[in-house]
Image (cartoon, rainbow, N blue to C red):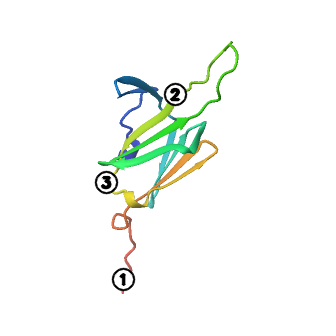
Amino acid sequence: MNQIAQPISTSPAVQSQENNHRKYYITPSVDITSNEEGYLLRAELPGVDKEGLEITVDNGELTFIGHRKFPQVVGDVVYKEIRTHDFHRVYELDPSIDTTKIHARLDQGILTLTLPKAETIKAQKITVE
């Protein structure tokens, strides 16, 4: 299995310590496909807009955090199923990925990350003269 397909954290709710208080995150559902060009990662981030999305690559790890905004509740909550936590996911990157060419797109709550392989890693056809 490729390293990009190896999440570092897989629990449904990830905890982090920030300023001495706990913050809970939801682990989003993700699909990853690969081909000769690289990898395509799709993550479900309902309620996250472009401004609420943080994507970083550091020390061979890809991290994305999706912050959600919810309207202020007016009245008493009678029933609640929607979780209001933010999303968080971390992946160890395959060393063949060209991190300078990673592309991100967010459309209708689906984050699509294109993770291309470096040119020197891609298979090449050699012609015989």
**Visible residue check, residue 89:** yes
Three-letter residue code for mark 3? Pro
Judge depth for marks 3 and 2 and give the one in front: 2
> From mark 1 to mark 3, how far is it between C-alphas?
30 Å
Q: Residues within 10 Å of mark 2 (few under 14, many from 20)?
A: some
Quarter of the N terminus within the rendering: top left
Three-letter residue code for mark 2? His
The circle on residue 31 is: none
Q: Which residue is mark 3?
A: 95
The circle on residue 85 is: 2
Percent coordinates x, y for residue 118 in the rendering: 37, 63
What is the residue that sits farthest to the left in this orientation? Answer: 59
Sequence-wise, which precedes: disc 3 or disc 2? 2
Q: Secondary structure at mark 1?
A: loop
Three-letter residue code for mark 1? Val
Quarter of the C terminus within the rendering: bottom left
Judge depth for marks 2 and 1 and give the one in front: 2
Q: Residue at x 38, y 57 (%)?
A: 99
Sequence-wise, which precedes: disc 1 or disc 3? 3
